[in-house]
Amino acid sequence: MRKLRILLIIFKRTKADKILLGMILFVLVAAFVIMLAEPGITSYFDALWYCYTVISTIGFGDITVTTLISKITSVFLTAYSLFVIAIATGVVVSFYNQVVQAQRDDSVSMFVDKLERLPELSKEELEEISDKIKKLR
């Protein structure tokens, strides 16, 4: 639950939440179109299930489409979902890299600050700096 909350915060900060919301709306509309166009799909739930199998590229085969409208909708749904998954992955990785870089920058700035105050540092702080330098080698 916490990880989901963190992902939602990341998506909100990067404005990718609008892309995800668009994806959800597109899936709901696509399921409705497929339900109306496809004679073998009689319920909205079945149409949503079909959309899930298309998006996840699992393709169980328990529900198949035969009409041209449903096939075209499936193609658009697949392409759009791959696009959204690629964007979402890129957003999370980019945000993570920014966090790691910020931590690195903070660490380097603290290290440089300690080096500037070298004569004022205690023996323990000097040993800590020495240990960090040895780990960098």
Image: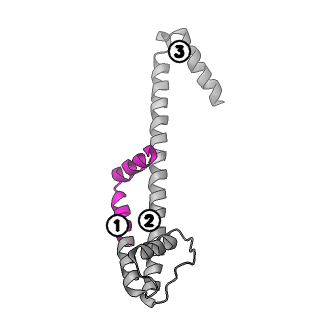
Position of residue 54 measured from the top left corner of the image (x, y, whole percent): 50, 74
Q: What residue lies at 49% left-to-right and 51% top-to-bottom?
A: 93
Q: Earlier in the sequence, mark 2 or mark 1?
A: 1
Above or below residue 51? Residue 6 is above
Mark 1 highlights which residue?
Answer: 22
Position of residue 65 measured from the top left corner of the image (x, y, whole percent): 49, 85
Residue 115 shown left or right of residue 30 in the figure: right
> Label 1 sits on what residue type?
Gly
Between disc 3 and disc 1, the foreground one is 1
Depth check, front residue: 109 or 98: 98
Numbered label attached to residue 107: none
Depth check, front residue: 52 or 43: 43
> Label 2 sits on what residue type?
Val
Q: What residue lies at 47% left-to-right and 35% top-to-bottom?
A: 103
Q: Which residues are the magenta region?
A: 1-26
Depth check, front residue: 46 or 73: 46
Q: Quadrant of residue 70?
A: bottom left
> Label 3 sits on what residue type?
Glu
Position of residue 32 measured from the top left corner of the image (x, y, whole percent): 36, 78
Q: Earlier in the sequence, mark 3 or mark 1?
A: 1
Of helix, strand and loop, which one carries label 2?
Answer: helix
Mark 3 highlights which residue?
Answer: 125
Q: Residues within 10 Å of mark 1 (few under 14, many from 20)?
A: some
Q: CA distance from mark 2 to mark 1?
A: 9 Å
Q: What residue lies at 33% left-to-right and 61% top-to-bottom?
A: 18
Magenta stretch containing residue 24, yes or no? yes
- Tags 2 and 1 in contact by the CB under 8 Å rule? yes
The answer to whether residue 79 is visible is no
